[in-house]
Image: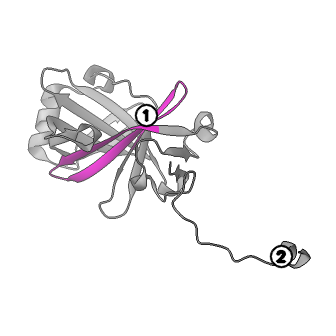
Amino acid sequence: MFGSLFRKRKKRAPTPEAGSLGGSVKDARVGDVFTITGLSVEYDDSYFIVEKLNHYESASGEWHEILGADGEKKLWVQWSGDGGLFVTANADAKPVSLNQVGVTEDELIRMDDEHSIDNHIDYEGVRFSYRNSSEAAYYQDNRGEGEGYYLWEFTGEEKVLSIDKWEGMPFQAFVSDVVSPESITVYKR
């Protein structure tokens, strides 16, 4: 009897059970839970449940986003795998107008025609350099034929500025923070 109590047991390899680590953010699925560190003190102790998983495509590649919720707190996390995992997070999903960003529709059209990295937008003390613009497709919940829209992308000091134009909607801009892929931990359901 004592032998069986004190005998060392062999450790088993982890299995993908509820509550297990699921790898990187790119492995997250609806219903999983994730944490993020280093974005904001407000989010360091939060456990976000993945409510949405969307897919996007454009001429520059593919990317994904998840919406996580912890009570009233919401967090959008986007990632692409082109040339390594690139991750951004946006805690405030409220769009900003072109006027607030300090750019006009005519300037965006010019930048789109030029496709030059010499173009930029200065917003909230950050210089955002033109990266790309093209038609894109949005696949809500990774399903369907996709909904088309036009997208302008700018990068700044550890931030990304995205401006989009959907049919019948005004232009809208969003600023996201670049985060380390290692700052996100996913727990599979």
Residue 88 in the magenta stretch? The answer is no
For the N terminus, the quadrant is: bottom right
Asked whether residue 157 appears in the rendered view, the answer is no
In this view of the protein, which residue sits in the foreground, 122 or 169?
A: 169
Q: Identify the disc placed on residue 4.
A: 2
User: Residue placed at 58% from the left, 46% from the top?
Assistant: 38
User: Residue placed at 45% from the left, 41% from the top?
Assistant: 31
Residue lying at the far right in this picture: please name it. 2
Between the residue at mark 2 and the residue at mark 1, the CA separation in whole angstroms equals 66 Å
The answer to whether marks 2 and 1 mark residues whose Cβ atoms lie closer than 8 Å is no
Q: SS at mark 2?
A: helix
- The kind of residue on which mark 2 rests is Ser
Residue 30 at x, y = what percent?
Answer: 41, 42
Residue lying at the far left in this picture: please name it. 113
In primary-sequence order, the first of circles 2 and 1 is 2
- Which contiguous range is marked in magenta? 50-77
- The kind of residue on which mark 1 rests is Gly
In this view of the protein, which residue sits in the foreground, 93 or 119?
A: 93
Q: Identify the disc placed on residue 144.
A: none
Residue 59 at x, y = what percent?
Answer: 14, 51
Residue 71 in the magenta stretch? The answer is yes
Q: Is residue 171 above or below residue 19?
A: above
Seen in the image, is 185 located left or right of residue 124? right
Asked whether residue 1 appears in the rendered view, the answer is yes
Quarter of the rendering containing residue 124: top left
In this view of the protein, which residue sits in the foreground, 27 or 76?
A: 27
